[in-house]
Image (cartoon, rainbow, N blue to C red):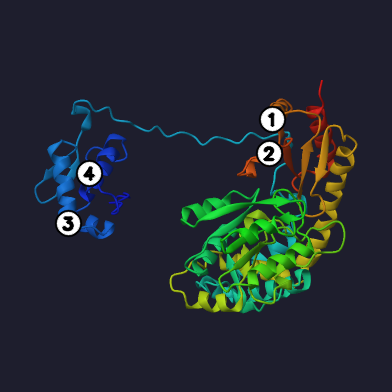
Amino acid sequence: MEMLMFHIDKSQKQPIYMQLYENIRNSIINGQLQEGEKLPSKRLLGDYLSISQTTIENAYAQLLDEGYIYSKQRSGYFVSDIDTLPLITPQRHAVTKPKTDHLYRYNFQLGAIDKAYFPFEQFRKFSKEAFDKSQDNLIESGDPQGDFTLRQQISHYLFHSRGVQSTPEQVIIASSTEQLLSIITDLLPKQHAFMLEDPIYPQVPQLLTRKHIPYQFIPVQANGIHIDHIEQCQNNIVYITPSHQFPTGVTMSLQNRIKLLKWASQHSERYIIEDDYDSEFRYEGKPIPALQSLDKAERVIYVSTFSKSIAPSIRIAYAVLPVHLTEQYQRTANIEGGTVPRHTQYIVSQFMESNQFERHLNRMRKIYRQKRDVLINYLSQYPSVCKIDGAQTGMHFVITITNGLSEQACLKRFKAYDINLQTLSHYRFQQLDTPPSFVIGFGGIDDSALQHHAEQLIRALQTS
């Protein structure tokens, strides 16, 4: 017998037994509890919901009086045939097949990689090693902070590629950026409130909302998040993507980085969370060091993933904590961790240790640069149709429509031309009266299809 999943809010004025009664009654009416199904005993349900048996007895008595359930001596309570009850129309939920996503012919999907260049041979080799009997230690649960070998490789890689100062002990492994952020918020000062870039990846404010953490949005300018607004705000945590802002693509200037670090260093409860998600792919100018590499006051928490550099399905994200937060993490009981399979961690650590990861990155940097160049070279021939921004780094850039079309008119044309393209406004929380902009993802487009994608995009946007 499965336990019932009911929401009981003890802060409400409504009596708990009435909340339970309504939960069970609605589940019976909606068909989630079927005729003849046995309800849990008062003791079991009381232990599960952390409420008294008397409360459950009162709820069951109300349901019994109204005919929703019946009792059998020495057997318990069961769901009645409610078709016989007056004024009740049972709602039976038919099982529906999941919708299949439309396969666009011209798909500028964000977050997609070029599957043709995935290092299948190397991963096959390391996978075979991971499941060899000599690696039987990988069957055990392992360190919730992540396997030391992988953390060692990440620490080494970050120092040489991004200038990040860390030891393996400061690195924590999780299955996503969202999980890392959830862990980090549990380590921050009790009284904390966020400042978020606008526009931003929606999952960040969604997670903060779920955890009841206050936040406010700060606009992004041509050189990154608006520093003056940060200095005027009372919130103490900043979440930024300084190297390649998502989704605008702008890079925070060195001057603003120094100002932000100075702001953070002025109070012991201020922190900067630096999301460096696709900084591996910089195509113009010198590589920009991570913000963490400039931090002398241990105020920066560095976050990144292997989603772009290897593949989204790898499901490995990592953070570098300041030393004092690392110590706090290790002291905190029941904190999240250990969600990445150890065999996957082994494969990625071997991929890095053998220098195959660095070779793969160098190869993909060249491939993605070529993809970007094909699109930009074609689109830049039509300045009267669109303007390009944020193309120096990463696997996406932004186009702003310059021919007077509205966002809705553009979307209607994209649909007619079978084009999948995300609006920049989708990521904005404070809408601006500006020409429509769209985010161009190019990583997953086949080399042979790039020119056709660009041509179709311009064809759709050209006014008739």
Label 3 neighbourhood size at 10 Å, few (<14), some (14-19), many (20+)? some
Which secondary structure, mark 3?
Answer: helix
In terms of sequence position, does the residue under pointer 1 or pointer 4 come before the other? Answer: 4
What is the distance, in whole Å, between disc 3 and disc 1 at their CAs?
A: 57 Å
User: Tag 4: residue type?
Assistant: Tyr
> Can residue 116 be seen?
yes
Q: Are marks 1 and 2 in contact (CB under 8 Å)?
A: yes
- Disc 3 target residue: 53
Which residue does the image show at 51% across and 76% down from the upper left?
328
Which secondary structure, mark 4?
Answer: helix
> Can residue 300 be seen?
no
Whole-percent x, y for residue 205 in the image: 55, 52
Q: Are marks 4 and 2 in contact (CB under 8 Å)?
A: no
Which residue does the image show at 69% across and 69% down from the upper left?
261
On-image quarter of the C terminus: top right
In terms of sequence position, does the residue under pointer 1 or pointer 2 come before the other? Answer: 1
- Disc 2 target residue: 423
What is the distance, in whole Å, between disc 3 and disc 4 at their CAs?
A: 13 Å
Label 1 neighbourhood size at 10 Å, few (<14), some (14-19), many (20+)? many
Whole-percent x, y for residue 152 in the image: 67, 76
Judged by depth in the image, the label closer to the viewer, 2 or 3, is 2
